[in-house]
Amino acid sequence: MRWASAKLVMDGLLNRDPHPAVMRFAGFENAMKTLTAIVAFTVVFALLAADADAAKKRKRKYRAAPAPVTHVDRSGNVELCNGGMMVTADDQIKGCTALIGSWITRDRKATAYYNRGNAYVGKNDFARAIADYTDALSQRKDYAQALFNRAVAQRISGNPQLAVADYTSAIMLTPGDADAFAGRGMSYARLAQHEKAIADYDQAIKLKPDHLTALTQRGHHHVRTQQWALAIGDYGLVLAIQKVSVEALYGRGVAKVYSGDVRGGQADMAQAQAFDSGVIARMTTQGIPPPQITDRTPAVAAAAPAANAPAQAAPLTVAPSMVTAAPSTVTATPSTVTPSTVVAPATAAPAPPSGTVQGGDLAASASEAKPRGFLDEIFGEPQTQPKPSP
């Protein structure tokens, strides 16, 4: 019996008319192999699926750290970080903060830092704005707008030397940017480096002849250096472009007073104060205090009145304590002249100490900063809005 069974197996192995029992055994073996393969495939697939799910969870956990400070989705954060008329500075900061803590490209993170810095400038938080512009530059070293805005924040914060360095770096990247030259000129003026300041104003006006800031600041420089005709000319150009320019109108009034046109100067200064009552304080901080105007005394009455004064009215003039009237010139009393006051053409203004900040510049304003960056979608290269005309 055992011999017969062995023979049947041998016949099967040798393919010699295999017995039906051998056929049944072979079919069972094939079925087991198939089942094993199916089980192995199922196990491998389950492991891969579990690993993929774990990877997604890790990715979500990473993107959520630090936790967003706003409850809107990522597209909402992009809209908030882009800013706009309907977005407050606080909401823009929230949106940008959420994007900065998420998984985005370096260029896009630079734009988010830049936009958040602009929002801080709008809140007059210049220290945080400078920190964000610095972070933006760490992500994108050739970010000219971040350099410019950091320079603005440094200058307004009272760091003109650092501002000069940033303006210079921005000019190296964008040599045709008139705003950068005008801003560097204001920084040089605060450092009492007036020759460099006037050179930068000239370059800004050469690049953009209707640059209001450069024209206004150059007019201020001419007043501080007693070049009344040049000051009146620059202020006139500003007022031809922008009818209501308070500082240009007031500066022209001061220049007219010291050049002898007291009546016309008084009219300009009064009109400027009607538009903005704070112009006197702002101009005084910039080294252009108001002349003291009083009724003409009998001792001075012999001086010729202004050409446009009424025939019968007693004309007004600069007080004798500040300016002594003469038929052709107006001179200052030396005892009342200080480095921050406007002096008469006959005497040179005392030079301020080297390295000190002299006067000021235009009022600090977030509008001076470059425009916001524009994040058009969650991933991809950021786009920047074109720079608007000042």
Image (cartoon, rainbow, N blue to C red):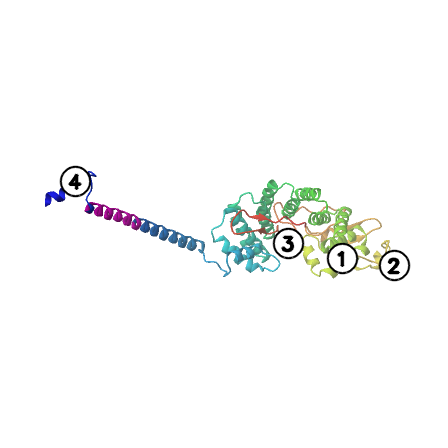
Q: What stretch is highlighted in magenta?
A: 21-39
Would residue 218 appear left or right of 161 to someone viewing this image?
A: right
- The disc, 3 or 1, on the residue closer to the chain's N-terminal end is 1
Question: Quick one: label 3, few (<14), some, or many (20+) residues within 10 Å?
Answer: few
Residue 116: image location, x then y, percent: 55, 54
Amino acid, disc 2: Pro
Residue 125: image location, x then y, percent: 56, 56
Contact between labelled residues 4 and 1, with CB atoms less than 8 Å apart: no
Amino acid, disc 3: Ser
Residue 10: image location, x then y, percent: 16, 40
Contact between labelled residues 4 and 3, with CB atoms less than 8 Å apart: no
Q: Using the numbered discs, state the Cα–Cα distance from disc 2 to disc 4 in whole angstroms.
A: 141 Å
Label 4: which secondary element: helix
Q: Name the residue under label 3.
A: 367
Check residue 38 for magenta coloring: yes
Q: Using the numbered discs, state the Cα–Cα distance from disc 3 to disc 1 in whole angstroms.
A: 25 Å
Q: Mark 1 points at which residue?
A: 269
Q: Which of the two discs, 3 and 2, sits closer to the camera? A: 3
- Residue at image coords 58%, 55%: 121
Question: Quick one: label 4, few (<14), some, or many (20+) residues within 10 Å?
Answer: some
